[in-house]
Amino acid sequence: MPAAASKRVRGTQIRRHFIIGNTACVLPAPGFPDPPPEGHTKGWTVYVRSLPNGPDLSTWLKKVQFKLHHTYTDASRTIEGPGPFEVTETGYGEFGVEIRLYFAPESGEKAVYREHYLSLAPYGSEEQKARQEKENKIVAEKLETVEFNEPTQEFYKSLTAEEQFQWLKVKKGRGKGKKPDYVFEGEVEPTAQLPERAQGGGEGSLGAGGTWSQGYERQVVAQLRESAGALEQMLEEERRGMEERKRKLQEVGASIAAK
Ligand code: SLL
């Protein structure tokens, strides 16, 4: 049962981006049973993860339930915090994994539902497909968001605490009697926001070294706007056609009445 909700921080929203996705490979492959189970041609891992430079999602995510296809024994797999929140399996077919996210008890928030459709086959351009085949690795990820509206005071405290960035730090120079000196790895400043530019893969590229960025987010938004524009145009043409039909109908009506 969730703990009694403490006072809420009025007028405050805290948003968290995170990743839901899967990797897949053709069997046999390292890390999977060899020979594979009868009829199983693919190995895969479905996961819920922090952004590469983002705060640790186990701050707010306490349990994940993955519901697999009913052909699996024990189709419901529950992973407790701090994770890693992932399930690795072998199989032959794609299906939608039902994912339930459970929040920290002090949040007073109800569990939320997400779905991830497993991608087991190469996708994208011919070049991308060729690379996925060569590396025997498919990565299919999407960016997800949760928003905590007026979080409880206790939850707000952990969502704004420094500890959630601890996982991005590497221990350095642990001398005798010295406290470990933590430094951030890589060049990107840790932040709860998406980075301005993608690391590695360049603007708008994902998987294989590319990461989520504000640049990529802008590109997705621009594409959506473009589609909305095209739809609006189609609607406008429909509207014009309708007016035309209406006018003709009236003409017919008028000529019948005149007879
Ligand atoms: C469908 N996409 O249309 C298919 C279902 C089945 C997934 C995919 C093996 C499970 C097992 C497996 O890959 N199941 O043998 O444990 O319904």
Image (cartoon, grey):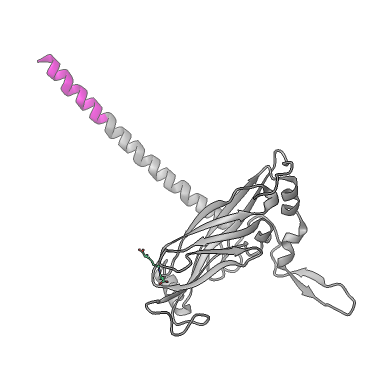
Q: Quadrant of residue 149?
A: top right
Q: Residue furthest bottom?
A: 35
Q: Is residue 189 above or below residue 147?
A: below
Q: Main secondary structure of the magenta part?
A: helix
Can you see residue 156? yes
Quarter of the rendered structure image containing ligand 1 = bottom left
| Image x and y of residue 231, in percent | 38, 43
Front-most of 128 and 30? 30
Q: Residue furthest top?
A: 258
Q: Is residue 174 magenta?
A: no
Q: Residue furthest right?
A: 177
Q: Is residue 106 above or below residue 84?
A: above
Residue displayed at 64% across by 58% down: 62
Q: Residue furthest left?
A: 259
Region of the chain picked out in magenta, as a range: 244-259
| Image x and y of residue 175, in percent | 86, 79
| Image x and y of residue 50, in percent | 62, 62
Can you see residue 138? no
Q: Is residue 59 above or below residue 232?
A: below
